[in-house]
Amino acid sequence: MPASYEKRILRVLNYIHENPAGDLSLDRLADVAAMSRFHWHRVFHAMTGETCAQSVRRIRLHRAAAWLIHQDWSIADIAACAGYPNVQSFTRAFSEAFDISPGAFRKTGRLGPRPTQKSKGSFKMFTVEMKQIPARRLAAIFHKGAYMDSGSCYKNLASTASSLQLWPEVQGMIGVHYDDPNVVAEADLRCHAGLVISPSTTLPEGLEEVHLAGGDHAVLRFKGPYTAIKIAYDYLYGEWLPHSGRDPADAPCYESYLNAPVDTRPDDLLTDICLPIAPKA
């Protein structure tokens, strides 16, 4: 694990440990890591096996357990110091983690086993290529909700392209994903489904214009059903990126679809996952 990424992970974990009652929001932790919010959460989860929220909970509860044994503070004070809004929420979280209430834990007089970090397991290997990709202009439909429920957006795009006879001008179909499903609730996930069109093509009525910047991109080609694509993201963010010597750009990752489910078996679907990469310093 290269030092730059390892140090970012450790810097964030130390920050959580030192500020259990502070601002530990996802955006704040991305700032501590000095990484784009579009990518930090995926990198952290892929490298540690935990979401940021799981790490925050684990560290807060471990600190609380130590305070219960080594300090004479009230349980309410410990709950507040550990970042919990009230004794009830703290007791519930602590009991779930340690299988014992905070009061009973204190009476044991010893520090029991801490909540353990999940193992990230092994990665399936994929080929990742660095490519210079030109800027792209999309005619797009916005979707909010589970990414797997965005299929109707692509059907609407295809219908629009057919009715307006746009297909000769369409250069591809792309999904731009703004949120990490590991940390954002399905109902709040945001994406654009878009057709790649030239700057001179008139934007069809009812579609939104989206611009993707050109430049260096790490491109991973995934073959298989969309429902299994998570393993490719885990490899890209948890294995390739930390060993690449490069930083992701402050722009969302997107998927370029090279064929379509209407005439392709799920196992033969081809998707290029395109990760924008920041210029070398």
Image (spheres, rainbow, N blue to C red):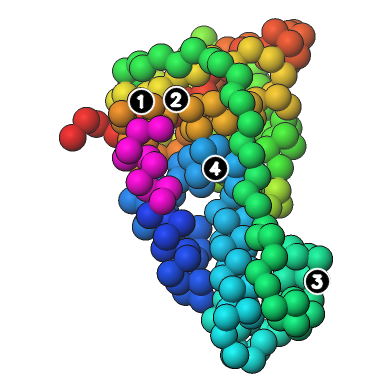
Task: Examine the rendered structure and indicate whether residue 239 appears above or below residue 14.
Answer: above
Name the outermost residue toward the left: 281
Q: Which residues are magenta?
A: 1-10
Cα separation between marks 1 and 4: 17 Å
Look at the image and tell me in which quarter the C terminus lies: top left
Point out residue 89 in the picture as x, y percentages from the top left corner: 72, 77
Q: Which residue is mark 3?
A: 100
Q: Earlier in the sequence, mark 3 or mark 1?
A: 3
Q: Earlier in the sequence, mark 2 or mark 3?
A: 3
Which mark is nearer the camera, 2 or 3? 3
Q: Which residue is mark 1?
A: 244
**131 with respect to 139 (left or right):** left
Q: Amino acid at mark 4?
A: Thr
Cα separation between marks 2 and 1: 6 Å
Q: Residues within 10 Å of mark 3 (few under 14, many from 20)?
A: some
Q: Amino acid at mark 3?
A: Ile
